[in-house]
Structures are given as C-alpha cells and as structure tokens.
C-alpha cells in the first residue's frame, strides 16, 4: 500500500487507539507516534441496547462498540477541522465495521485505505511491515 507522506494511520481495536504519521514517503513508510487522542467511549451505536439482559449479557461488547463509534467521531472532528488530509485505518474486523457506520462523508473523502487486522499492541516495525504488504 502506498502511503503518502504526512498520512495519519489510526490503529485500533475495541479498547485501544494509537495514531501515527508517515514521515517517510509513499514507498518507504516511517511511522512516528502521535500524541494520544481523546476518545469519547460513551457513544452508543445506533441500535445498541442500553441495558443488559439475560438475552444480551455482554456489556463489554457494547463498551467496545461504543469505543469504536467514539474513534470514528474523533477522526471525523479531526478531518473536519483540517488536521487530517490523508487517513488509513487499521482495525480489528469488528471494530472496523463499527467505525465505518460513523464515517462522515469528509472522512470517507480523505480515507486512503483500510486494513482489517488487529495490530494494536504490535511494534511500529510490525505495523509498517503489515502496511507495506497490504
């Protein structure tokens, strides 16, 4: 995957988000960690239930979906504020699906690619390698 210089790479799962910027060029990716971004994990995805029941006892999945929606909201704000001109999202498959539901049109316009892999907790070198192979 070609990743232009200054592209922001969001690496996420249902509990963690890391942001990086490519300081290299399109063929030689050199990721630099960005400051931790605040994510409002209280976002309840549409259709989600607010209370647990015996039929749906898994509050942790609801929390993860809320975090995913919060990531999309935060990225939307950064794109709309002009802070992100190019974006690649690397996320666990379920997280990516939840995030897509909240993409603003402007975010979709700057989205250069997506990779449905859980790379949170991996080293920068491993993330660079996965992006290069995509």
Image (cartoon, helix red, strand yellow):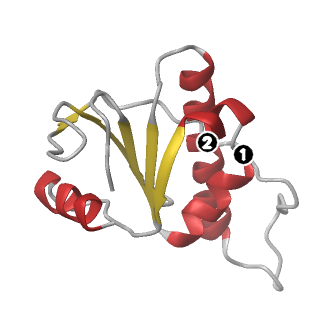
x then y, percent, for residue 58: 67, 76
x then y, percent, for residue 54: 81, 84
**Label 2: how many residues lie within 10 Å, few (<14), some (14-19) or many (20+)?**
many
Which image quarter holds the N terminus? bottom left
The residue under the point 23% across, 58% down is 127
Residues 48 and 72: in front is 72
Q: Classify residue 91 by image quadrant.
A: bottom left
Residues 5 and 82: in front is 5
**Label 1: how many residues lie within 10 Å, few (<14), some (14-19) or many (20+)?**
some
Give above or below for 10 relative to 95: above
Identify the disc placed on residue 102: 1
Q: Classify residue 52 by image quadrant.
A: bottom right
x then y, percent, for residue 25: 19, 36
x then y, percent, for residue 99: 63, 53
Q: Classify residue 55 by image quadrant.
A: bottom right
Q: Which residue is mark 2?
A: 72
Which residue is most to the bottom?
55
Q: In terms of secondary structure, where does tag 1 sit? A: loop
Give above or below for 13 relative to 53: above
Q: Give left or right: position of 110 versus 28.
A: right
Q: Give left or right: position of 118 versus 58.
A: left
């Amino acid at each position: 995957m070609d990743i232009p210089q200054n592209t922001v790479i969001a690496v996420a799962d249902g509990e963690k988000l890391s942001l990086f910027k490519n300081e290299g060029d399109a063929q030689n990716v050199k990721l630099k960690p960005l400051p931790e971004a605040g994510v409002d994990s209280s976002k309840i995805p549409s259709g989600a239930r607010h209370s647990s029941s015996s039929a749906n006892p898994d509050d942790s999945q609801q929390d993860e979906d809320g975090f995913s929606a919060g990531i999309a909201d935060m990225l939307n704000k950064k794109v709309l504020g002009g802070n992100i001109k190019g974006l690649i999202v690397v996320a666990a498959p379920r997280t990516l699906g939840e995030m897509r539901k909240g993409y603003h049109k402007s975010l979709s316009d700057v989205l250069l690619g997506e990779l449905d892999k859980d790379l949170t907790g991996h080293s920068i070198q491993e993330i660079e390698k996965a992006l290069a192979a995509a």
